[in-house]
Image (cartoon, grey):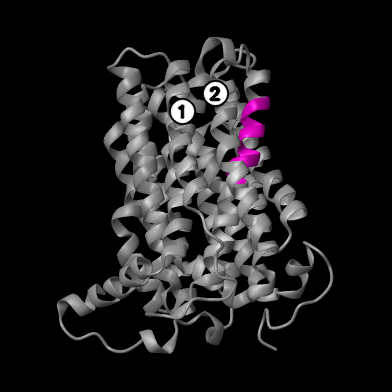
Protein backbone atom coordinates (compact mmCIF):
# COMPACT_ATOMS: atom_id res chain seq x y z
CA UNK A 1 0.00 0.00 0.00
CA UNK A 2 1.22 3.48 -0.84
CA UNK A 3 2.25 5.37 2.35
CA UNK A 4 -0.28 7.80 3.67
CA UNK A 5 -3.28 6.40 1.80
CA UNK A 6 -5.22 5.48 4.92
CA UNK A 7 -5.71 6.99 8.33
CA UNK A 8 -5.01 4.81 11.37
CA UNK A 9 -5.35 5.32 15.08
CA UNK A 10 -2.36 6.00 17.26
CA UNK A 11 -2.34 9.74 17.91
CA UNK A 12 0.61 11.97 17.19
CA UNK A 13 3.22 9.22 17.16
CA UNK A 14 1.08 6.92 15.06
CA UNK A 15 2.33 8.73 11.96
CA UNK A 16 5.83 7.61 12.87
CA UNK A 17 4.81 3.96 13.18
CA UNK A 18 2.58 3.65 10.14
CA UNK A 19 4.75 5.48 7.59
CA UNK A 20 8.04 3.54 7.40
CA UNK A 21 9.43 5.42 4.41
CA UNK A 22 8.74 8.83 5.93
CA UNK A 23 10.36 7.49 9.11
CA UNK A 24 13.61 7.03 7.20
CA UNK A 25 13.38 10.57 5.84
CA UNK A 26 12.65 11.85 9.34
CA UNK A 27 15.50 9.96 11.02
CA UNK A 28 18.00 11.01 8.35
CA UNK A 29 17.14 14.67 8.87
CA UNK A 30 17.18 14.26 12.65
CA UNK A 31 20.69 12.82 12.70
CA UNK A 32 22.15 15.47 10.41
CA UNK A 33 20.44 18.28 12.37
CA UNK A 34 22.05 17.05 15.57
CA UNK A 35 25.49 17.44 14.05
CA UNK A 36 24.70 20.81 12.47
CA UNK A 37 24.36 22.52 15.86
CA UNK A 38 27.78 21.17 16.88
CA UNK A 39 29.06 22.71 13.66
CA UNK A 40 27.34 26.08 14.28
CA UNK A 41 28.84 26.49 17.74
CA UNK A 42 32.27 25.43 16.49
CA UNK A 43 32.15 28.11 13.76
CA UNK A 44 31.21 30.78 16.33
CA UNK A 45 34.14 29.59 18.48
CA UNK A 46 36.48 29.86 15.49
CA UNK A 47 35.33 33.37 14.63
CA UNK A 48 36.09 34.78 18.06
CA UNK A 49 38.96 32.54 19.15
CA UNK A 50 36.73 31.39 22.01
CA UNK A 51 35.71 34.94 22.95
CA UNK A 52 33.02 37.37 21.76
CA UNK A 53 33.26 37.85 18.01
CA UNK A 54 32.17 41.10 16.42
CA UNK A 55 28.48 41.41 15.53
CA UNK A 56 29.36 41.90 11.85
CA UNK A 57 31.57 38.79 11.66
CA UNK A 58 28.80 36.73 13.26
CA UNK A 59 26.20 38.30 10.96
CA UNK A 60 28.23 37.41 7.86
CA UNK A 61 28.25 33.74 8.91
CA UNK A 62 24.54 33.76 9.74
CA UNK A 63 23.80 35.46 6.42
CA UNK A 64 25.88 32.86 4.60
CA UNK A 65 23.73 30.25 6.30
CA UNK A 66 20.70 31.88 4.65
CA UNK A 67 21.58 33.82 1.49
CA UNK A 68 22.46 30.77 -0.67
CA UNK A 69 18.96 29.46 0.01
CA UNK A 70 17.50 32.66 -1.44
CA UNK A 71 19.85 32.77 -4.43
CA UNK A 72 19.65 29.09 -5.28
CA UNK A 73 16.06 28.50 -4.18
CA UNK A 74 14.38 28.86 -7.60
CA UNK A 75 16.84 26.46 -9.26
CA UNK A 76 16.68 24.10 -6.27
CA UNK A 77 12.90 24.02 -6.58
CA UNK A 78 13.14 23.12 -10.26
CA UNK A 79 15.64 20.36 -9.47
CA UNK A 80 13.31 19.01 -6.77
CA UNK A 81 10.44 18.91 -9.26
CA UNK A 82 12.52 17.48 -12.12
CA UNK A 83 15.23 15.17 -10.70
CA UNK A 84 15.06 12.09 -8.50
CA UNK A 85 14.52 13.41 -4.98
CA UNK A 86 16.25 10.54 -3.20
CA UNK A 87 19.39 11.09 -5.28
CA UNK A 88 19.30 14.81 -4.52
CA UNK A 89 19.23 14.19 -0.77
CA UNK A 90 21.97 11.55 -0.74
CA UNK A 91 24.28 13.57 -2.99
CA UNK A 92 23.86 16.67 -0.82
CA UNK A 93 24.63 14.67 2.34
CA UNK A 94 27.83 13.17 0.93
CA UNK A 95 29.12 16.48 -0.42
CA UNK A 96 28.23 18.20 2.87
CA UNK A 97 30.29 15.66 4.84
CA UNK A 98 33.36 16.47 2.73
CA UNK A 99 32.72 20.21 3.03
CA UNK A 100 32.38 20.12 6.81
CA UNK A 101 35.68 18.26 7.18
CA UNK A 102 37.29 21.24 5.45
CA UNK A 103 36.81 23.28 8.63
CA UNK A 104 39.47 21.11 10.27
CA UNK A 105 42.05 22.80 8.03
CA UNK A 106 41.01 26.31 9.07
CA UNK A 107 42.80 28.24 11.80
CA UNK A 108 41.01 30.29 14.46
CA UNK A 109 40.08 33.76 13.29
CA UNK A 110 40.83 32.95 9.64
CA UNK A 111 37.60 34.41 8.31
CA UNK A 112 37.59 33.86 4.54
CA UNK A 113 37.84 30.02 4.58
CA UNK A 114 35.17 29.93 7.30
CA UNK A 115 32.86 32.05 5.14
CA UNK A 116 33.55 30.00 1.99
CA UNK A 117 32.95 26.60 3.62
CA UNK A 118 29.81 27.87 5.31
CA UNK A 119 28.45 29.09 1.97
CA UNK A 120 29.10 25.74 0.29
CA UNK A 121 27.52 23.77 3.15
CA UNK A 122 24.34 25.84 3.09
CA UNK A 123 24.18 25.81 -0.72
CA UNK A 124 23.92 22.04 -0.50
CA UNK A 125 21.16 22.40 2.10
CA UNK A 126 19.36 24.77 -0.29
CA UNK A 127 19.00 21.90 -2.76
CA UNK A 128 18.13 19.29 -0.14
CA UNK A 129 15.34 21.11 1.71
CA UNK A 130 12.85 21.61 -1.18
CA UNK A 131 13.29 17.94 -2.10
CA UNK A 132 12.59 16.87 1.49
CA UNK A 133 9.57 19.17 1.81
CA UNK A 134 8.18 17.94 -1.51
CA UNK A 135 8.61 14.30 -0.46
CA UNK A 136 6.83 14.64 2.89
CA UNK A 137 3.21 14.74 1.61
CA UNK A 138 4.01 11.87 -0.79
CA UNK A 139 5.33 9.64 1.97
CA UNK A 140 2.70 10.38 4.64
CA UNK A 141 -0.41 11.54 2.76
CA UNK A 142 -2.59 14.57 3.47
CA UNK A 143 -4.27 13.17 6.60
CA UNK A 144 -0.97 12.84 8.45
CA UNK A 145 0.59 16.14 7.41
CA UNK A 146 -0.10 18.04 10.64
CA UNK A 147 1.32 15.25 12.81
CA UNK A 148 4.33 14.74 10.53
CA UNK A 149 5.20 18.45 10.50
CA UNK A 150 4.64 18.78 14.25
CA UNK A 151 7.00 15.88 14.84
CA UNK A 152 9.55 17.31 12.40
CA UNK A 153 9.46 20.72 14.04
CA UNK A 154 9.65 19.26 17.52
CA UNK A 155 12.58 17.09 16.49
CA UNK A 156 14.35 20.09 14.91
CA UNK A 157 13.96 21.74 18.28
CA UNK A 158 15.06 18.71 20.24
CA UNK A 159 18.18 18.42 18.10
CA UNK A 160 18.72 22.17 18.46
CA UNK A 161 18.46 21.75 22.24
CA UNK A 162 20.65 18.66 22.51
CA UNK A 163 23.11 19.88 19.88
CA UNK A 164 23.47 23.27 21.57
CA UNK A 165 23.89 21.78 25.04
CA UNK A 166 26.20 18.91 24.08
CA UNK A 167 28.00 21.01 21.48
CA UNK A 168 28.83 23.61 24.12
CA UNK A 169 30.16 20.87 26.42
CA UNK A 170 32.22 19.33 23.61
CA UNK A 171 33.71 22.74 22.83
CA UNK A 172 34.52 23.41 26.47
CA UNK A 173 35.91 19.96 27.29
CA UNK A 174 37.24 18.40 24.06
CA UNK A 175 37.57 21.16 21.47
CA UNK A 176 36.09 22.45 18.24
CA UNK A 177 37.68 19.79 16.03
CA UNK A 178 35.65 17.08 17.75
CA UNK A 179 32.45 19.05 17.12
CA UNK A 180 33.28 19.35 13.40
CA UNK A 181 34.06 15.64 13.11
CA UNK A 182 30.75 14.70 14.72
CA UNK A 183 28.87 16.82 12.19
CA UNK A 184 30.59 15.09 9.25
CA UNK A 185 29.74 11.66 10.64
CA UNK A 186 26.06 12.57 10.99
CA UNK A 187 25.86 13.46 7.28
CA UNK A 188 27.19 10.01 6.39
CA UNK A 189 24.67 8.32 8.69
CA UNK A 190 21.88 10.36 7.10
CA UNK A 191 22.90 9.27 3.60
CA UNK A 192 22.89 5.62 4.64
CA UNK A 193 19.31 5.91 5.90
CA UNK A 194 18.11 7.69 2.76
CA UNK A 195 19.56 4.90 0.63
CA UNK A 196 16.69 2.69 1.83
CA UNK A 197 13.92 4.88 0.36
CA UNK A 198 12.04 3.26 -2.55
CA UNK A 199 12.78 4.44 -6.08
CA UNK A 200 9.18 4.81 -7.29
CA UNK A 201 8.00 7.10 -4.46
CA UNK A 202 11.00 9.43 -4.53
CA UNK A 203 11.19 10.33 -8.21
CA UNK A 204 9.85 13.63 -9.51
CA UNK A 205 6.35 13.73 -11.05
CA UNK A 206 6.43 12.42 -14.60
CA UNK A 207 5.01 15.59 -16.12
CA UNK A 208 8.14 17.49 -15.06
CA UNK A 209 10.61 14.99 -16.48
CA UNK A 210 10.50 16.02 -20.13
CA UNK A 211 13.88 16.63 -21.73
CA UNK A 212 15.04 20.23 -21.62
CA UNK A 213 15.70 22.00 -24.92
CA UNK A 214 17.94 25.03 -24.99
CA UNK A 215 20.03 26.66 -22.27
CA UNK A 216 17.16 28.44 -20.50
CA UNK A 217 15.09 25.27 -20.47
CA UNK A 218 18.07 23.30 -19.17
CA UNK A 219 18.43 25.79 -16.31
CA UNK A 220 14.75 25.37 -15.55
CA UNK A 221 13.65 28.88 -16.49
CA UNK A 222 10.25 27.74 -17.80
CA UNK A 223 9.69 25.63 -14.69
CA UNK A 224 10.59 28.61 -12.49
CA UNK A 225 8.12 30.80 -14.38
CA UNK A 226 5.40 28.18 -13.97
CA UNK A 227 6.00 28.05 -10.22
CA UNK A 228 5.96 31.84 -9.90
CA UNK A 229 2.76 32.04 -11.95
CA UNK A 230 1.13 29.53 -9.64
CA UNK A 231 2.04 31.59 -6.56
CA UNK A 232 0.98 34.86 -8.20
CA UNK A 233 -2.42 33.50 -9.24
CA UNK A 234 -3.33 32.03 -5.83
CA UNK A 235 -3.86 34.59 -3.08
CA UNK A 236 -4.09 31.98 -0.32
CA UNK A 237 -0.63 30.68 -1.21
CA UNK A 238 0.82 34.21 -1.19
CA UNK A 239 -0.69 34.98 2.22
CA UNK A 240 0.75 31.84 3.81
CA UNK A 241 4.20 32.42 2.30
CA UNK A 242 4.22 35.98 3.66
CA UNK A 243 3.72 34.65 7.21
CA UNK A 244 7.19 33.12 7.31
CA UNK A 245 8.61 36.08 5.39
CA UNK A 246 7.32 38.34 8.18
CA UNK A 247 8.72 36.12 10.92
CA UNK A 248 11.98 36.18 8.99
CA UNK A 249 12.32 39.83 10.01
CA UNK A 250 13.29 38.36 13.39
CA UNK A 251 16.00 36.35 11.67
CA UNK A 252 18.68 38.06 13.73
CA UNK A 253 17.59 36.00 16.75
CA UNK A 254 20.66 33.76 16.42
CA UNK A 255 22.85 36.86 16.36
CA UNK A 256 21.08 38.38 19.38
CA UNK A 257 21.28 35.22 21.50
CA UNK A 258 24.91 34.64 20.56
CA UNK A 259 25.92 38.17 21.57
CA UNK A 260 23.76 38.08 24.69
CA UNK A 261 25.21 34.77 25.87
CA UNK A 262 28.74 36.12 25.41
CA UNK A 263 28.11 39.14 27.67
CA UNK A 264 29.68 38.78 31.11
CA UNK A 265 26.38 38.99 32.96
CA UNK A 266 24.96 36.12 30.88
CA UNK A 267 27.92 33.73 30.86
CA UNK A 268 27.67 30.46 32.76
CA UNK A 269 30.63 29.57 34.95
CA UNK A 270 32.50 32.35 33.17
CA UNK A 271 32.22 30.60 29.80
CA UNK A 272 30.80 32.37 26.74
CA UNK A 273 30.35 28.98 25.00
CA UNK A 274 28.15 27.75 27.86
CA UNK A 275 26.20 31.02 28.02
CA UNK A 276 25.46 30.90 24.30
CA UNK A 277 24.65 27.20 24.44
CA UNK A 278 22.16 27.76 27.29
CA UNK A 279 20.20 30.45 25.45
CA UNK A 280 20.21 28.38 22.26
CA UNK A 281 18.97 25.41 24.29
CA UNK A 282 16.05 27.45 25.67
CA UNK A 283 15.17 28.43 22.12
CA UNK A 284 15.21 24.79 21.08
CA UNK A 285 12.99 23.69 23.97
CA UNK A 286 10.36 26.30 23.11
CA UNK A 287 10.49 25.40 19.42
CA UNK A 288 9.99 21.74 20.30
CA UNK A 289 6.99 22.11 22.58
CA UNK A 290 5.07 24.79 20.65
CA UNK A 291 3.78 22.58 17.82
CA UNK A 292 2.42 20.01 20.29
CA UNK A 293 0.41 22.68 22.09
CA UNK A 294 -0.86 24.00 18.76
CA UNK A 295 -1.89 20.53 17.63
CA UNK A 296 -3.67 19.82 20.92
CA UNK A 297 -5.67 23.04 20.65
CA UNK A 298 -6.24 23.43 16.92
CA UNK A 299 -6.27 19.77 15.87
CA UNK A 300 -7.21 19.70 12.15
CA UNK A 301 -9.75 22.52 12.34
CA UNK A 302 -8.94 25.02 9.58
CA UNK A 303 -10.33 28.04 11.42
CA UNK A 304 -8.55 27.19 14.67
CA UNK A 305 -5.29 26.65 12.83
CA UNK A 306 -5.48 30.18 11.41
CA UNK A 307 -6.45 31.72 14.76
CA UNK A 308 -3.64 29.89 16.54
CA UNK A 309 -1.18 31.10 13.91
CA UNK A 310 -2.38 34.69 14.41
CA UNK A 311 -1.99 34.51 18.20
CA UNK A 312 1.51 33.03 17.88
CA UNK A 313 2.54 35.70 15.37
CA UNK A 314 1.88 38.43 17.95
CA UNK A 315 3.09 36.55 21.04
CA UNK A 316 6.58 35.73 19.75
CA UNK A 317 7.86 39.30 19.15
CA UNK A 318 6.16 40.61 22.31
CA UNK A 319 8.01 38.02 24.39
CA UNK A 320 11.30 39.02 22.78
CA UNK A 321 10.69 42.51 24.14
CA UNK A 322 10.82 40.86 27.57
CA UNK A 323 14.10 39.14 26.62
CA UNK A 324 15.60 42.57 25.92
CA UNK A 325 15.05 43.75 29.50
CA UNK A 326 15.89 40.46 31.28
CA UNK A 327 18.42 40.93 34.14
CA UNK A 328 20.16 37.54 33.96
CA UNK A 329 20.46 34.42 31.77
CA UNK A 330 17.79 32.49 33.68
CA UNK A 331 15.06 35.09 33.15
CA UNK A 332 16.18 35.67 29.56
CA UNK A 333 16.15 31.94 28.92
CA UNK A 334 12.59 31.63 30.23
CA UNK A 335 11.32 34.35 27.88
CA UNK A 336 13.28 32.90 24.95
CA UNK A 337 11.56 29.58 25.64
CA UNK A 338 8.10 31.19 25.67
CA UNK A 339 8.79 33.26 22.56
CA UNK A 340 9.68 30.17 20.56
CA UNK A 341 6.54 28.37 21.62
CA UNK A 342 4.93 30.99 19.36
CA UNK A 343 7.60 31.08 16.66
CA UNK A 344 7.53 27.32 16.08
CA UNK A 345 3.73 27.27 16.12
CA UNK A 346 3.40 29.80 13.30
CA UNK A 347 6.11 27.99 11.35
CA UNK A 348 4.47 24.56 11.57
CA UNK A 349 0.91 25.73 10.92
CA UNK A 350 1.91 27.80 7.89
CA UNK A 351 3.83 24.79 6.51
CA UNK A 352 0.84 22.49 6.97
CA UNK A 353 -1.57 24.96 5.36
CA UNK A 354 0.74 25.35 2.38
CA UNK A 355 1.34 21.62 1.92
CA UNK A 356 -2.40 21.00 1.90
CA UNK A 357 -3.27 23.41 -0.88
CA UNK A 358 -0.29 23.17 -3.25
CA UNK A 359 -0.43 20.36 -5.86
CA UNK A 360 2.52 18.02 -6.11
CA UNK A 361 3.84 19.11 -9.49
CA UNK A 362 4.67 22.65 -8.22
CA UNK A 363 5.31 21.77 -4.60
CA UNK A 364 9.10 21.83 -4.78
CA UNK A 365 9.19 25.26 -6.44
CA UNK A 366 6.60 26.68 -4.06
CA UNK A 367 8.53 25.63 -0.98
CA UNK A 368 11.78 26.80 -2.54
CA UNK A 369 10.20 30.22 -3.14
CA UNK A 370 8.88 30.36 0.42
CA UNK A 371 12.22 29.33 1.92
CA UNK A 372 14.10 31.76 -0.30
CA UNK A 373 11.92 34.69 0.80
CA UNK A 374 12.36 33.75 4.46
CA UNK A 375 16.12 33.59 4.02
CA UNK A 376 16.15 36.96 2.25
CA UNK A 377 14.18 38.57 5.06
CA UNK A 378 16.33 36.93 7.71
CA UNK A 379 19.66 37.71 6.01
CA UNK A 380 18.69 41.35 5.56
CA UNK A 381 17.80 41.67 9.23
CA UNK A 382 21.12 40.08 10.24
CA UNK A 383 23.17 42.65 8.33
CA UNK A 384 21.06 45.66 9.31
CA UNK A 385 21.07 44.88 13.02
CA UNK A 386 24.77 43.93 13.02
CA UNK A 387 25.62 47.30 11.48
CA UNK A 388 23.46 49.08 14.06
CA UNK A 389 25.33 47.25 16.82
CA UNK A 390 28.87 47.68 15.46
CA UNK A 391 28.60 51.04 13.69
CA UNK A 392 25.49 52.72 15.00
CA UNK A 393 26.35 52.65 18.68
CA UNK A 394 23.00 51.11 19.63
CA UNK A 395 22.98 48.70 22.57
CA UNK A 396 22.10 45.05 22.14
CA UNK A 397 18.99 45.40 24.30
CA UNK A 398 17.71 48.38 22.27
CA UNK A 399 18.32 46.51 19.01
CA UNK A 400 16.30 43.51 20.22
CA UNK A 401 13.43 45.84 21.17
CA UNK A 402 13.56 47.46 17.74
CA UNK A 403 13.50 44.11 15.93
CA UNK A 404 10.56 42.85 17.97
CA UNK A 405 8.58 46.04 17.36
CA UNK A 406 9.11 45.87 13.59
CA UNK A 407 8.03 42.21 13.55
CA UNK A 408 4.61 43.28 14.82
CA UNK A 409 4.00 45.02 11.46
CA UNK A 410 3.73 41.82 9.34
CA UNK A 411 1.76 40.20 12.17
CA UNK A 412 -0.76 43.02 11.94
CA UNK A 413 -0.92 42.72 8.14
CA UNK A 414 -1.64 39.01 8.43
CA UNK A 415 -4.37 39.69 10.99
CA UNK A 416 -6.23 42.06 8.69
CA UNK A 417 -5.65 40.24 5.40
CA UNK A 418 -6.15 36.59 6.29
CA UNK A 419 -9.12 34.70 4.86
CA UNK A 420 -10.38 31.22 5.31
CA UNK A 421 -8.06 29.05 3.24
CA UNK A 422 -9.29 26.38 0.87
CA UNK A 423 -9.55 22.98 2.52
CA UNK A 424 -8.63 21.08 -0.62
CA UNK A 425 -5.67 21.36 -2.95
CA UNK A 426 -5.83 24.18 -5.45
CA UNK A 427 -5.95 23.32 -9.11
CA UNK A 428 -2.92 24.25 -11.16
CA UNK A 429 -3.12 27.34 -13.43
What secondary structure is found at the residue carrying circle 1?
Answer: helix
Identity of the residue drawn at 58% across and 77% down: 138
Q: Earlier in the sequence, mark 1 or mark 2?
A: 2
Q: Position of residue 128 (x, y in %)?
A: 44, 63
Identity of the residue drawn at 77% across and 61% down: 12
Which residue in the structure is indicated by mark 1?
405
What secondary structure is found at the residue carrying circle 2?
Answer: helix
Q: Nearer the viewer, residue 83 or 221?
A: 221
Q: Residues within 10 Å of mark 1 (few under 14, many from 20)?
A: some
Q: Position of residue 226 (x, y in %)?
A: 31, 75
Q: Which residues are magenta?
A: 334-344
The quarter of the rendered structure image containing the N terminus is bottom right
Horizontal side, residue 241 vs residue 284: left or right: left
The chief SS type of the magenta part is helix
Q: Position of residue 135 (x, y in %)?
A: 53, 73
Q: Is residue 44 magenta?
A: no
Q: Position of residue 99 (x, y in %)?
A: 39, 52
Which residue in the structure is indicated by mark 2?
321
For the residues labelled 1 and 2, the Cα–Cα distance comes to 8 Å
Q: Is residue 47 visible?
A: yes
Q: Nearer the viewer, residue 319 or 417?
A: 417
Amino acid sequence: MRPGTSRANGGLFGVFRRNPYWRRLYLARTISLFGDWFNALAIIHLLGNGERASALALAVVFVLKQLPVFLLGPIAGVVADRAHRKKILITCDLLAAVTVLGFLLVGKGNLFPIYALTAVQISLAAFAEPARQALTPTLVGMDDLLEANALSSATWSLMFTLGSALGALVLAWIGWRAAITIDAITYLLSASLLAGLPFDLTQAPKRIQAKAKGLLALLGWEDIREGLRFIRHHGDVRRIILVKFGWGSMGAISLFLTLLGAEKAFRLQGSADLGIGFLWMCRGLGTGIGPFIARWYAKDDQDRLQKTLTFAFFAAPLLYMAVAIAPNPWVAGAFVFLAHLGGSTLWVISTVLLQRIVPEHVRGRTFAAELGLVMLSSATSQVVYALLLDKGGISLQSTILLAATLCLVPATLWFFSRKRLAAQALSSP
